Image (spheres, helix red, strand yellow):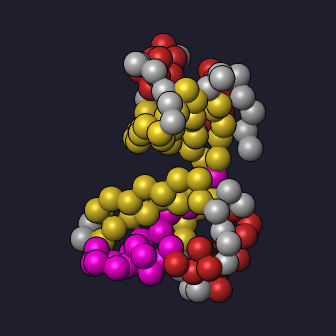
Amino acid sequence: MADLIRTAQYFKVQIADKPGTLAGALTPLREAGVNLLAVHAFPRSRRTQVDVVPEDPIAFKNIAKAYKLKIQGPKMCLLLDGDDRPGALADLTDRLSSARINMTAVTGLCAGQGRFGAILWVKPRDVKKAAKVFGIGLS
């Protein structure tokens, strides 16, 4: 199977850097049936920044508003998935490097059953150029 590369909208949510706050932010989304394609959380300025890539950005925004989650965005990222193999992520990131596009962050992982996945961030001004490198449109 060929690698699937697509652009996606993501939102930033700032939460307290305490046990249970991520679960507290994700629970209303689960209860509302909002499917998340990716979640990446990391410490930032004594808080935790959570980048959320919802399958349905409109549904996500509606639930976030109803539960008074303070969100920023949408912004764009790239989602990648495909067959796991040595160098899968290196091959894809090399294409961006060859186009002189700097990645601001990347998270890759083995998804099991011979699959891999990654979320890749570039500067907003480079999203269109990165999409062109991969031969995809903006979503």
The magenta stretch is 9-26
x, y percentage for residue 89? 45, 26
Based on the picture, tell me whether residue 13 belongs to the magenta stretch. yes
Q: Is residue 8 left or right of residue 46?
A: right
Q: Residue at x 34, y 67 (%)?
A: 48
x, y percentage for residue 65? 64, 81
Q: Is residue 94 above or below residue 130?
A: above
Q: Residue at x 68, y 56 (%)?
A: 55
Based on the picture, tell me whether residue 97 belongs to the magenta stretch. no
Instruction: Let me know if residue 80 appears in the view.
Output: yes
Instruction: Kindly give the residue lying farthest to the front in the view shown.
Output: 113
Q: Is residue 7 above or below residue 96?
A: below
Q: Is residue 120 left or right of residue 127?
A: left
Q: Residue at x 47, y 39 (%)?
A: 112
Give the image quarter of residue 43.
Answer: bottom left
Instruction: Let me know if residue 96 appears in the view.
Output: no
**In the rendered image, which quarter contains the C terminus?**
top right
Instruction: Kindly give the residue lying farthest to the top in the view shown.
Output: 98
Q: Is residue 128 left or right of residue 13?
A: right
| Count of numbered badges drawn on the protein | 0
